[in-house]
Amino acid sequence: MLRFRLSCLILALGVALFPGCRPRATGNSLTLAGSTSIQPFADKWAEVFMEKHPGVAVNVQGGGSSAGIQACESGACGIGMSSRELKGDEKALHEIVIARDGLAVIVHPSNTRRGLKTGEVKQIFAGDLRRWAPLGGPDRPITVVTREEGSGTRGAFQEMVMGKTRIFSGAITEDSNGTVREIVARDPAAIGFISLGLVNDQVRALALDGAAATDANILNKSYRLVRPFLFLSRGEPTGRAKEFIAFVLSDEGQALVAKEGLLPVR
Amino acid sequence: MTAKTRGNRLERNDRLIRLALLVVAFSAVSVLAVITVFIVGQGAPIMFRYGFKSFLAGTEWYPAEKLFGLWPMIVGSVFVTLGAMVIGVPLGLSCAIVLTEFASKRVRGVIKPVVELLAGIPSVVYGFIGVVILVPLIRETFGGPGLSVLAAAVILGIMILPTIISISVDALQAVPPSYREGSIALGATKWQTVKMVLLPAARSGIVASIILGMGRAIGETMAVIMVAGNAAAVPGSLLAPVRTLTSNIALEMGYAAGEHRQALFATGVILFVIIMALNSAANVTASRMKGTRR
């Protein structure tokens, strides 16, 4: 009997205590949402920013560029993050470029090709060029590796390389930069694209139209596959959002970016 | 405290406990109801908007251009699952027969726990082994990218073994000993007994095991994403990459918004219908098995 009452009490307590213990949003919290490419950097900035401003909570969420843009438009987050350019109605938002990211076209290190023309890359991803032989690479069918629909990296590649042409549906599709790199690193006939900051010695970044994929070439504009990382807000940012953006654009904020392989904007 | 009030109180507690248990039991059922309503509610409108035909028979999946053809993924799921059956059913069935009829007690004592262990390995581990060992092997031996229908079928074929083996073993063991004894007494060899008496007698149980294995293969996601290559095109050969319905959802959920997201729910609706149909089929055959035994 006693035990029964006791267990009822514990159950009731448990039900009463668990939900609803999250603090409500106040002037001391800021939410960022959007591109998963920017998210890791935003996490770093948030960490340092919170150290400098005790009592302020900066909350970073992913969801993808499109979700970030929507959340910003609806006011669900203070700052939206996008790793692709805004289009159409989205341009009504206030945008600040906080960093740039190069896009690298990568192949297996054993591949004899050191570079391709942008047009050739386009043909390969459109599925019109299916073998390496005519390009002077290994005598194998090309393994084309792309990102999934909706990914900001794919969106940027589509816009800058493919234009209106589709990436052909027979291409191998993976859902992260890391997996694409992993597959290209293992398959001598593979080609893919990832963030320039994530290229390591397992893969080779191809030169495009004669320009190697280096920071210097991006700065002098000879390597053209560059996408902006954007912070978005409804109208001019104010309050905590303004402070946070100022910190991100400060020397300290930009130094964090450079350390992780992105290109600072200043 | 009189005996009567004490009795009343016990009775009341009994009712309370019964009610509490009922609520808990129905919470499991209501979760299924909620899932059904949610998936259909999210996925059905877009199917009506673009028409069932363009969803089921459309061959082009370009959500950015509002093209939501799921045909390649439906075909992909079917190919991969059939492949898994071709590999898993003979292996699993032979293993079940050996375990029940031919293996000594000691051998059985080793194999059975190992098979059960196989069921406990997380699917991501299967996928990882597939990527590291199977995919390069296929690429070097047969050519192509290695990430293929074949790789997915082999991995899934192994993953469904525990389901097929354990249920088939149950079905074979449930055959009354008199069948076995009668057949041996008539002069049949052990293999003849298995082939002509036991397998037909355990047929519905074995069929149920195969259907449940099929359900597992269709529903598997992680391992398939890792080894199948996920190209949203109808595969031209066993060595071509393929995308299944489950991979389609898991792969694109992260970034999908608006109609793209709804189209993924529509993918879920189709998957849901297929798996419900398979499970009901398994239940029907399994209950038929019980019926004939009595």
Image: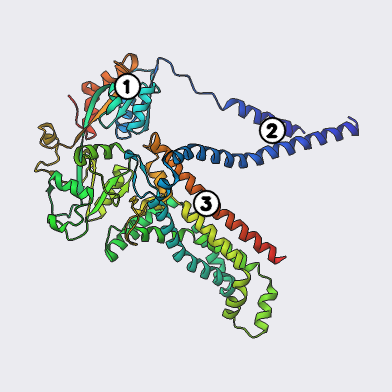
Which amino acid lies under the numbered mark 2 shown in the image of this protein? Ser
**Quadrant where the N terminus of chain B lies?**
top right
Residue for point 49% across, 44% down: B269
Within 10 Å of the Cα at label 1, are there few (<14), some (14-19), or many (20+) other Cα atoms? some
A240 or B46, which is in the foreground?
B46
Q: Image quarter for residue B31?
A: top right
Residue for point 38% across, 47% down: B69
Residue for point 40% across, 40% down: B253
Mark 3: secondary structure? helix
C-beta proximity under 8 Å, tags 1 and 2: no
Q: Which residue is mark 1?
A: A49
Cα separation, mark 1 vs mark 3, equals 49 Å
A210 or B101, which is in the foreground?
A210
C-beta proximity under 8 Å, tags 1 and 3: no
Q: Are marks 1 and 2 on the same chain?
A: yes
Q: Are marks 2 and 3 on the same chain?
A: no
Q: How many marks?
A: 3
**Quadrant where the C terminus of chain B lies?**
bottom right
Q: Which residue is mark 2?
A: A7
Q: Residue furthest bottom?
A: B187
**Chain containing mark 2:** A
Q: Image quarter for residue A56?
A: top left
Within 10 Å of the Cα at label 2, are there few (<14), some (14-19), or many (20+) other Cα atoms? few
Q: Is residue A169 left or right of residue B180?
A: left
Which amino acid lies under the numbered mark 3 shown in the image of this protein? Ile
The vertical placement of B250 against B176, above or below, is: above
Q: Which residue is mark 3?
A: B275
Which of disc 2 and disc 1 is earlier in sequence?
A: 2
